[in-house]
Image: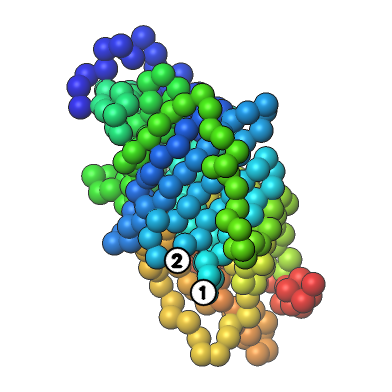
Amino acid sequence: MVPAQAAARETAESWLLKLGPALNMTTYRGVFVYSRGDQVSSMMIAHRYRDGQVDERLVVQDGANGEIIRRGSRVVCVLPEHGRIHLDQVIPSGPFAEAFASQQVPVGAWYQPELLGEDRIAGYPAVVIALQPRDDHRYGYRLWMEKDTGLLLKSHVRQQDEVLERFQFTTLEITDYLPDSEFEVNVGAEVKDITPVLNLSGEHGGMDGWDLGWRPDGFMPAATPRGGRGQAVSFSDGLATFSVFVEPAGTPEMPQGASRIGATTLYMHYTEAGEADRERFLVTVVGEIPPHTAMQVAQSVTVDDRNALARALAD
């Protein structure tokens, strides 16, 4: 890595303003590698911006031969010949999360941006930006952005000096034109329409019969996963997202505590409701937050009206 010279006239904040538009409005094809924990996968991507519409095709290069195709607001999942693939195993977080695709990555109150220098990724010169968390309830980020377009070429999710997740293009061609043939579904493949993207509800989840007593500053209500276990609510600070699920305790009971793959933490905790029978409920927190933060969120959940919660779960 060499000191930033050509980019010295621009600030870290001005580069971040380019990030969302570049991800949507740049036309390119390539292969990237994504890793979290000991899981490593590679994907081929073709992305086109034409006449105000985004077309995109992601093809899994390892294991099952699934792919996802996006045409504007419509998203379809092409399933492998045998078995099924889960969307969260196909589309990585980080650069393809909603935060990175938005028009502006929010910083300021929760992250300190810093221009680190220049580098070269997949044959393209890049500017390196660090986003340092201002508290210990969120991770830091390091972003490598292509100097002409602002396209994200590489990213790290970091906890101090430890890299928890990595994304990087290994081959890339930024171009003005990609043909329609690069976005066609294979003939005979089983196709499942999954619009909207990642099966997310555009509405914020409700907390019927239970309450969340604490969440980190800056995490606001966000689109909530649809079809998850129990009743769910989600929160985001603009980069990281976590969801809280509440459901009656099942049999056998799940072990309490935290597990983490890369930057994604899953924390399970049991809470009780009712003075007579002390009915138990399972609280699950999952998202890109440190384990101690997930624990604090989960342990702050109280069930104050089990009947209201039961009605909500039955709907």
Relative depth, front residue between 133 and 11? 11
- Distance from the alpha carbon under mark 2 to that under mark 1: 8 Å
Position of residue 195 relative to residue 53, above or below, is below
Identify the residue at horizontal 43%, vertical 28% (top origin): 174
Question: Quadrant of the rendered structure where residue 142 is?
Answer: top left
Tell me if mark 2 has few (under 14), some (14-19) or many (20+) residues whose alpha carbon lies within 10 angstroms of its own: some
Residue labelled with disc 1: 82
Q: Residue 291, percent across and down? A: 39, 60
The residue labelled by disc 2 is 64
* Mark sitting on residue 272: none
- The answer to whether residue 296 is seen in the rendering is no
What is the count of numbered marks? Answer: 2
Q: Is residue 165 above or below residue 23?
A: below
Quarter of the picture holding the N terminus: top left
Tell me the quarter of the picture where residue 206 sits: bottom right
Asked whether residue 152 is in view, the answer is yes
Q: Are marks 2 and 1 in contact (CB under 8 Å)?
A: yes
Q: Position of residue 283 (x, y in %)?
A: 55, 71
Give the x, y percent position of residue 153.
37, 34
Residue drawn at x 55%, y 90% is 251
